[in-house]
């Protein structure tokens, strides 16, 4: 079968294992496409037989109804992806009821048969070892135990990485949560940075509203010295406040 697609990736040191020759392969993220851009591309590239506006309207109607049905406990299988409600947390008695402080209700999305079949048409090009000055490898929400997924406002968050210590006196230095809907950057108060090491930060997540966020850290830290200007590392996964 002909290869139709190419995804590019870099190698990064795996800081979560002691092996110095252990690397993780991380896809070089292209920009995120929204519904409008995908519908426009479907018309201009894919030759869709309806207008982009009509397609976008129909897609948004579908997604809204899908969300409604998921919230009523149904699972969804589009062929391209599957979605279902999921509960994290345990019950300690046969009569225990749902407790928002103890149990986490969320939705899980998995690749479907059609999308998995498309992998036959995709190749991966590894570009070599990435030249990075700092990287965020993993984020753990302490309350739920969620890894690279959930955020709990006003609770501790563990951030693991490389050269992520907050250092220097530049006003921009610090840890930020970037709201993906509004682009607002919410900075963690310096007093809420509990642990500040080159390989681990523990911060108290701000009082964030429900939505999706990306974690950023800005610092002048470097081994043996400080950088003249601050630099920013951005975690490549999107995190959710329910």
Image (cartoon, helix red, strand yellow):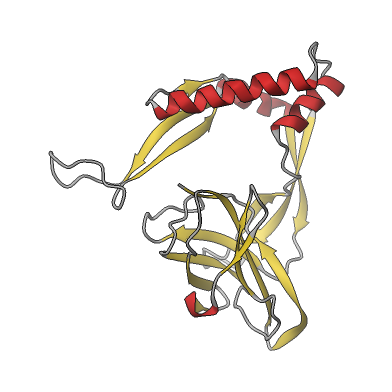
- Residue 22 horizontal side relative to residue 82, left or right: right
Q: How many numbered marks have been drawn onto this rendered protein structure?
A: 0
Q: Taking 200 as reference, is 214 above or below it?
A: above
Q: Taking 147 as reference, is 81 above or below it?
A: above
Compare residues 3 and 69 and report the one nearer the observer.
Answer: 69
Residue at point 65%, 58% (across, down): 184
Rendered location of residue 162, percent (x, y): 61, 70
Rendered location of residue 67, percent (x, y): 50, 28
Furthest toward the top, the residue is 49
Picture quarter containing residue 5?
Answer: top right
Residue at point 71%, 24% (across, down): 56
Furthest toward the bottom, the residue is 224
Q: Quadrant of the N terminus?
A: top right
Q: Is residue 194 visible?
A: no
Rendered location of residue 232, percent (x, y): 71, 68
- Residue 60 horizontal side relative to residue 202, left or right: right
Q: Is residue 190 visible?
A: yes
Rendered location of residue 113, percent (x, y): 56, 21
Residue at point 80%, 17% (across, down): 51
- Residue 89 horizontal side relative to residue 174, left or right: left
Q: Taking 69 as reference, is 224 above or below it?
A: below
Compare residues 133 and 217 and report the one nearer the observer.
Answer: 217
Q: Taking 207 as reference, is 37 above or below it?
A: above
Compare residues 224 and 241 and report the one nearer the observer.
Answer: 241
Picture quarter containing residue 175?
Answer: bottom right
Picture quarter containing residue 12?
Answer: bottom right
């Amino acid at each position: 079968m002909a290869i139709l697609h190419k995804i590019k990736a870099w190698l990064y040191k795996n800081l979560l294992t002691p092996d110095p020759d252990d690397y993780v392969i991380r896809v070089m993220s292209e920009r995120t496409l929204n519904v409008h851009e995908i519908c426009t591309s479907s018309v201009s590239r894919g030759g869709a037989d309806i207008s982009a506006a009509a397609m976008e309207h129909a897609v948004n109607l579908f997604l809204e109804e899908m969300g409604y049905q998921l919230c009523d406990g149904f699972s969804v299988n589009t062929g391209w992806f599957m979605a279902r409600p999921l509960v994290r947390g345990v019950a300690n008695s046969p009569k225990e009821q749902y407790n928002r402080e103890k149990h986490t209700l969320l939705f899980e999305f998995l690749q479907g048969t059609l999308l998995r079949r498309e992998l036959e048409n995709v190749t991966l090009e590894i570009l070599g070892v990435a030249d990075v000055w700092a990287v965020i490898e993993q984020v753990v929400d302490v309350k739920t135990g969620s890894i690279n997924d959930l955020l709990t406002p006003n609770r501790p968050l563990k951030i693991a990485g490389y050269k992520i210590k907050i250092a220097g006196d530049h006003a921009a230095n610090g840890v930020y949560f970037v709201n993906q809907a509004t682009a607002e950057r919410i900075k963690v108060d310096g007093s809420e940075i509990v642990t500040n090491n080159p390989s681990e930060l523990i911060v108290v997540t701000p009082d964030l509203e429900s939505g999706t966020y990306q974690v950023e850290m800005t610092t002048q830290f470097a081994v043996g010295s400080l950088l003249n200007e601050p630099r920013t590392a951005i975690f490549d996964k999107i995190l959710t406040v329910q």
